[in-house]
Amino acid sequence: MDALSPTELLTQLRTHRWVDLTHAFGPGIPHYHAFPDEERTTLFHFDEGVGTDGSGFLAHRYSHIGQWGTHCDPPAHFTRGGRFLDELPVTEMVLPLVVLDLRAQAAADVDHAVTPEDVTAHEAEHGRIPDGAFVAARWGWDARWPDGEAMAGRGDDGLAHFPGWGVDALRLLVEERGVVAIGHDTTDTDPGAVVSAGTAPAETYVLGADRWQIELLANLGDVPATGAIVVATWPKPEEGSGFPARVFAIAPNG
């Protein structure tokens, strides 16, 4: 049987569900506590006197850190000599999507770090994670967006409290399952208490393993545990250490 042409394949894909996994960003959104807020200036506006530089059309200047909103972290974000954004090939931007539903673990322990047992429990129900996949941790934290305090969950101890990845689980995914990338719906790779204490072992490991990640994913509850594909795209700044991304899934109907 002849393979479908790209246009035929697109026609077939359009019969499936397309799910946006991206938060819109702007000033004041939740972000890593040490980063500055976005600043946005209207340089040109349709009306005279509104834009700082002129009128007749609409144009903004955006000033924000690369790790802003739903964004991509390349290996170079944490690893000297690691790949920058412009060095990540487009062949890595379309991947099988696996979603680990970890809401129960987060409800039982807000500081939960993903364990190898969490991964193998998922596989016992849904099958082995395929080689070359994008594996996302669904904690349900996107429901807290855009409330930064709710997402941080800061306690009386002054530390943030939200779930994250554990190094042993990531080692399993990278070294035994061959994942290309990971993602999560929280602001950080590591649990909040770990980040607040000034360390980031999970993020250090996964980016040091030449993998990339997407932080602050949305709508993971609208895609199945397996069977979907993820498309993750971002601008191509030369030697870019991170940038807002547009991420979506193509999922089976039903």
Image: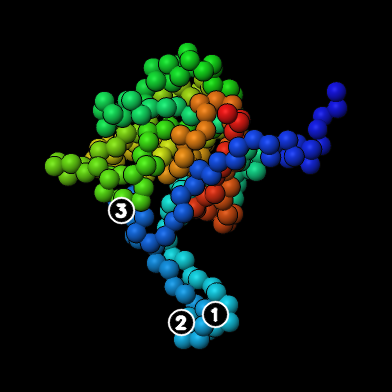
Q: Quadrant of the N terminus?
A: top right
Query: In percent of the image, x 79 and y 38: which residue is there?
Result: 8
Q: Quadrant of the C terminus?
A: top right
Q: Is residue 122 above or below residue 36?
A: above
Q: What residue did someone put label 1 on?
A: 46
Q: Which amino acid, by three-letter code, is at mark 3?
A: Ala
In whole angstroms, how far apart are the C-alphas of marks 3 and 1? 36 Å
Q: What residue did someone put label 2 on?
A: 50
- Work out which residue is located at the far bottom of the displayed protein and give it: 49
Whether tag 3 and tag 1 are in contact, CB under 8 A, the answer is: no
Q: Which amino acid, by three-letter code, is at mark 1?
A: Phe
Q: Nearer the viewer, mark 3 or mark 1?
A: 1
Q: Which amino acid, by three-letter code, is at mark 2?
A: Val
- Work out which residue is located at the far top of the displayed protein and give it: 124
On the image, the x and y values in percent for residue 112 come to 30, 28
Q: Which mark is residue 34?
A: 3
User: Which element is circle 3 on?
Assistant: loop
In whole angstroms, how far apart are the C-alphas of marks 2 and 1? 8 Å
Q: Nearer the viewer, mark 2 or mark 3?
A: 2
Q: Is residue 207 visible?
A: no
- Mark found first going from the N terminus, 3 or 1: 3
Query: In percent of the image, x 39 and y 42: which residue is there?
Result: 142
On the image, the x and y values in percent for residue 223 come to 52, 33
- Work out which residue is located at the far front of the displayed protein and give it: 254
